[in-house]
Image (cartoon, rainbow, N blue to C red):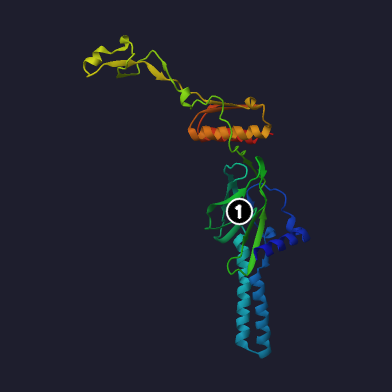
């Protein structure tokens, strides 16, 4: 049934120019009004209309006043449901859209901030790019509605048209409206599945060897080969064995320096995928990193904000 109505709407938009006047992007906020809300009978509504015609013909043929009264009452209820379906969308406002983060090929979560206005809204459905989400909101309140947007490539992606529709309250009519917000979302590049590590990662144990320092780090038990000049005689007198002054300290931790110029043997998209993977590994391990790109250099940092800044820079590359 949903596929039938989708094909009908596509046919109607091709044949009726009035249905296509909101195909151009529009700035937020967007408010629905009577000139942009469309309504047609649903499959159930069409069958119910045929049934009412049969009941009306029978009531008139047999001069049955009770049947005629029932038919008129059902027709009145049907007409009232059409008005209720229209009022469920009339005055509804889309005030803002917030986008999350996603890599190419993943679903990106969008938050549509909907303002109910003066009336409560029931059984409203938002549909975008084949995905649908239902919601209800009380009068004079706002509600963030989450819906997923499928992505296929990195970079800026224009939001598709958004359809708001309802068949409330009886399912006899379907009212809908189109929204086309003038907004693009940034899709992060997809990291490569596997590959070599960055040059000289400092989280490797071989790069955290101890080195000699001038400050006393700790006292440890004597080991064969230790110099007698390092023996702490006063502390050893209060201990069962000899204690040795340990002046060794861990080597200071360095950062991953991720440089576009170090990947000259790869094409541009392969470089972006590899740098994205290295950034993800650095974020997962808690290793500070820096990133050099053509026209932009991001200094050492760590954490979600630094990771998002680096991925945004990769996504914006031509």
Q: Between residues 151 and 299, which one lies in front from this camera angle?
A: 151
Q: Please tell me whether residue 94 is drawn above or below residue 285 in the rendered image.
A: below
Q: Nearer the viewer, residue 156 or 80?
A: 156
Q: Residue furthest front?
A: 224
Task: Judge by depth and name the residue closer to the eye, 255 or 156.
Answer: 255
Give percent across and percent down for residue 69.
61, 83
State the residue at coordinates (46%, 26%). 205
Residue that badge 1 annotates: 93
Based on the displayed image, in which of its 4 quarters is residue 176 positioned? bottom right
Q: Position of residue 124 (x, y in %)?
A: 58, 60
Give the quarter of the figure containing the C terminus.
Answer: top right
Residue found at x 40% / y 14%: 213
Q: Circle 1 sits in a helix, a strand or a loop, which is it? A: strand
Give the residue drawn at x 68%, y 89%: 61
Residue drawn 31% across the image and 19% down it: 220
Is residue 84 among what the camera can see? yes
């Amino acid at each position: 049934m949903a596929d039938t109505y989708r094909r009908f709407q596509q046919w109607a938009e091709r044949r009726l120019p009035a249905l296509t006047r909101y195909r151009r992007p529009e700035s937020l906020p967007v408010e629905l009004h009577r000139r942009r809300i469309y309504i047609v009978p649903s499959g159930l509504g069409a069958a119910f209309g045929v049934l009412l015609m049969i009941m009306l013909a029978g009531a008139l043929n047999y001069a049955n006043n009770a049947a005629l009264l029932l038919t008129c009452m059902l027709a009145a209820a049907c007409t009232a449901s059409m008005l209720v379906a229209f009022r469920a969308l009339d005055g509804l406002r889309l005030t803002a859209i917030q986008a999350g983060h996603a890599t190419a090929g993943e679903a990106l979560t969008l938050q549509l901030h909907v303002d109910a206005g003066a009336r409560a809204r029931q059984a409203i459905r938002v549909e975008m790019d084949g995905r649908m989400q239902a919601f209800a909101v009380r009068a004079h309140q706002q509600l963030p509605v989450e819906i997923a947007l499928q992505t296929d490539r990195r970079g800026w992606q224009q939001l598709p048209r958004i359809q708001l529709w309802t068949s409330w309250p009886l399912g006899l009519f379907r009212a809908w409206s189109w929204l086309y917000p003038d907004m693009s979302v940034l899709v992060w590049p997809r990291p490569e599945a596997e590959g070599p590590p960055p040059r000289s990662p400092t989280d490797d144990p071989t790069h955290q060897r101890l080195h000699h320092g001038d400050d006393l780090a700790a006292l440890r038990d004597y080991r064969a080969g230790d110099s007698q000049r390092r023996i702490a005689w006063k502390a050893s007198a209060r201990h069962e064995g000899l204690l040795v002054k340990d002046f060794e300290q861990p080597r200071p931790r360095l950062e991953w320096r991720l440089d576009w110029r170090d990947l000259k043997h790869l094409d541009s998209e392969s470089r972006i995928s590899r740098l994205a993977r290295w950034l993800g590994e650095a974020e997962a391990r808690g290793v500070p990193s820096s990133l050099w790109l053509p026209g932009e250099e991001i200094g050492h940092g760590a954490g979600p904000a630094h990771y998002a800044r680096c991925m945004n820079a990769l996504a914006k590359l031509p």
